[in-house]
Image: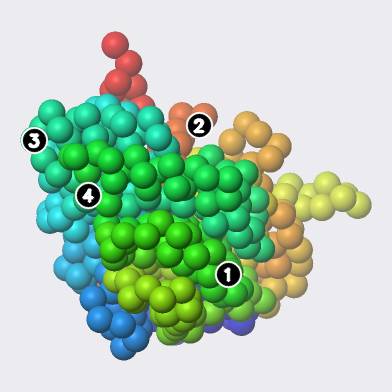
Amino acid sequence: MKPLDQVLPPSAAVTAEGHLSIGGCDLVELAEEHGTPLVVYDEGALRGMARAYRAAFAALAPDVDVIYASKAYFGQAMLRLANEEGLCVDVASGGELFAALRAGFPPGRIYMHGNNKDAREIREALAAGVGTVIVDNLDEIDLLAREAAAAGVRQDVLVRVTPGVKPSTHSYISTGQIDSKFGFSIEGGPARAAVDAVRAAGSLDLIGLHCHIGSQLFDLSGYGAAAAIVADFAASCGGDDLRVMDMGGGLGIAYTGEDRPAAVEDYAEAVVEAVRGEWGRVGLPMPRVLVEPGRSIVGRAGVTLYRVGGVKEIPGVRTYASVDGGMSDLMRPMLYGAVYEPLLANRAEAEPTQTLRLVGKHCESGDVLVSEAALPPVGPGDLVCLPATGAYGVSMASNYNGVTRPAVVFVDGGSARLVTRRETYDDLVARDM
Ligand SMILES: *Cc1c(COP(=O)(O)O)cnc(C)c1O
């Protein structure tokens, strides 16, 4: 097998028949039973990451809340698992709020995000009793203040600020710079105006600040840089209401054998020590720290299985192997040029002797899953496993070309349970009047 240990869930193994297994379940058998594409999550790995996060922060600071960023994968089974493991949840729309409530999350442990919450979503959040709303623009502060007053409630609020830090990641997932659709810039005054507006609203309680500098970060120094700027800003605001500092998410994961992500423990130390040090420097008491990991909780725990159909060799150019999914279940290669490393689930120990292009079945030339895939010779019926697809895979899925979205299975201790059924053709036309 290729040296992909760090991209597969820790329970990955090869069976006597040479099949890849996860959580004690043979992936070839799972694909036969449930069809392909199939998303398989290792439940032990999901719980393991949730626990590692809580333990790493608990060791460094009291009452840190770890908030699962549900947009990474918001299936009901995952939301219930996050709740069971003592995580809070962040939602970025009315739909994600609905899903979190349906999964049984106590409203007080829900954090409501979004850069354009509409009146309906704000009313839904207030009616549910969502614990904290993170505000993103002045119009929204106005709307939230009016709706909260009308509902007769006082709403806890964090102000999302952009510290002007540009971490080294893809520009589409970099959010901390000043020129961003997210948050209030500290530079130039918008963040101060937001703090003043929330303080002035009788129906809103300002409890702290939020910043999320970006995603898929390997370099932890960005958190220190952001904390320094936000601490100066907090000190300049005066008052003693800024008791909470939400440092966002962003810890990267390995997608290939070459990636070297930071450990959760190192990330926790970087974040907590940055806040402790910077708040100390400006003479403010240590705030309660919140973090919002998404990708790093679910990414490595999930793999996607695809069945190879046609294989086409263009002499002197390259070989294309087409699979039965593509951009409809995994947008990241098209969206960010993300690189994945596939392996064969049905011949896991065969040597990768060729490079081919692994493509999806959609009517787009850009529907490429892996541009340069090192694989053994493949033919129709082979089962490709794409590791590290647990985050931003099915949560970004579409029905392009009338392709039905995949089923999702959780595996653990040798047994598998279907947690989301595959879409049907009837589902595809169900909403058309
Ligand atoms: C997406 C997002 C996260 C999670 O980011 P990851 O990189 O998946 O950890 C956290 N907070 C906010 C505000 C986000 O938009």
Residue at 62% of width from left, 66% of height from top? 341
The numbered dot on residue 152 is: 3
Q: Taking 98 as reference, is 149 above or below it?
A: above
The quarter in which the N terminus is drawn is bottom right
Q: Which residue is mark 4?
A: 205
Q: Residues within 10 Å of mark 2 (few under 14, many from 20)?
A: some
Q: Residues within 10 Å of mark 3 (few under 14, many from 20)?
A: few
Marks 3 and 4 sit apart, C-alpha to C-alpha, by: 13 Å
Marks 4 and 1 sit apart, C-alpha to C-alpha, by: 27 Å
Q: Which residue is mark 1?
A: 225
**Amino acid marked by disc 1:** Ala
> Does label 4 or label 1 sit earlier along the sequence?
4
**Amino acid marked by disc 2:** Tyr
The numbered dot on residue 400 is: 2
Q: Is residue 54 visible?
A: yes
Mark 3 element type: loop
